[in-house]
Amino acid sequence: MTAISFGPSRGRAGALERTLSGITEALESSLFAEEISGRPGLFQSLDARVKLILVLAFLISVGLSRNLLIIVSIYCLVLILGWRSAIPPSLLVKRVWLALPFFTGLIILPAIFMTPGPGLLRLPLGLVITRTGAISALFLLLRVSTSLSLTLLLILTTPWNTLLSALGALRVPAVFVLMLGMTYRYLYLLLRVTNEMFLSRKSRVVGRLSVADSQQILASVAGALLAKSLDLSSAVYLAMQSRGFRGTIVTLNPFRMQPKDWFWSAVLGSIAALSVILGR
């Protein structure tokens, strides 16, 4: 059987294949996150409220710290906690550091050259990397990477419904919790519908498409997806109501503090407090 290819050039994946691949990868990442939260591990065994408070405490300590060594120590602690929670350290490193150059790099790059200070390295075209700019960029890079790793550790080790229920238990406004829950469910279903639409379109195309034809197909799929999303939003809400949803997130496992929760709250909370003191 001859493989079907899209796009004007041979050997290059067309727009349909790239879009389909990205959607499938997003779905697989979501399913993989749910699978990790069910593994036996340190963070999985803790109360969701404890994890929320501890992660918030470390985020505050990272944001207030003026010591690079403290921030690096917290980042290493996150990797250790992830390893003890059945999360491969490579997973935390890849998910964080592969995304940093595209977002944080846009802010860091001008700061390296435009921040006043003594020159550290001279580049062609008269560009000078200042010492102050390099230190500021390093601080920003470490703070963002550590904060993202902390958030990722919480999300990967906590089922979404449990996390939303913990937010409600900590007196987060119900409207905010409801919006988060609806957004998660709606985006997941929307990704599945989009994946099915592109897969259906791909199965009906024989041969190679030109750029104009590929763009026309993408435009038609986007229009159909917009119309379908309007119906899907009401269907999602009705499905949630039919399953007992009345505006609050309820889990089958009620929150109950255990001795290990108190122990790790004291240990990690003390580390976070000490990080704030030493970092200042």
Image: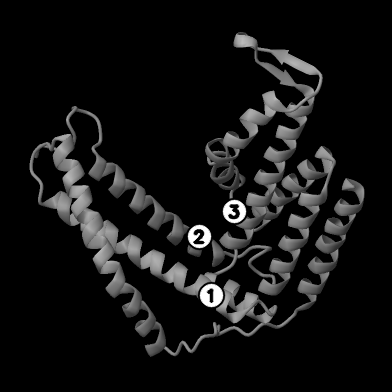
Residue 5 visible from this viewpoint: no
Q: Name the residue beneath numbered marker 2.
A: 33
Query: Where is residue 188 shown, x and y percent of the image?
Result: 39, 65
Is the residue 12 above or below the residue 154 in the image?
Answer: above
Label 3 and label 1: CA atoms lie apart by 20 Å
Q: Name the residue beneath numbered marker 3.
A: 87
Q: Amino acid at mark 2?
A: Ala
Secondary structure under tag 2 reads: helix
Q: Residue at 52% across / 37% down in the picture?
A: 102
Tell me whether the residue at label 1 lies in contact with that at label 2, contact meaning CB atoms closer than 8 angstroms: no
The part of the image, by quadrant, that contains residue 6 is top left
- Density class for disc 2 (Cα within 10 Å; few <14, some 14-19, many ≥20) is some
Secondary structure under tag 1 reads: helix
Left of 79 or right of it: where is 20? left
Camera-nearest residue between 130 and 256: 130
Q: Quadrant of the N terminus?
A: top left
Q: Name the residue beneath numbered marker 1.
A: 161
Q: Amino acid at mark 1?
A: Asn
Is the residue 115 above or below the residue 46 in the image?
Answer: above
Q: Amino acid at mark 3?
A: Ile
- Density class for disc 1 (Cα within 10 Å; few <14, some 14-19, many ≥20) is some
Nearer-N-terminus badge (1/2): 2
Query: Where is residue 272 shown, x and y percent of the image?
Result: 83, 57
| Closer to viewer: mark 2 or mark 3 | 2
Label 2 and label 3: CA atoms lie apart by 10 Å
Query: Where is residue 218 shown, x and y percent of the image?
Result: 22, 48
Query: Where is residue 29 shown, x and y percent of the image?
Result: 45, 55
Is the residue 177 above or below the residue 102 in the image?
Answer: below
Q: Residue at 83% across / 63% down in the picture?
A: 269
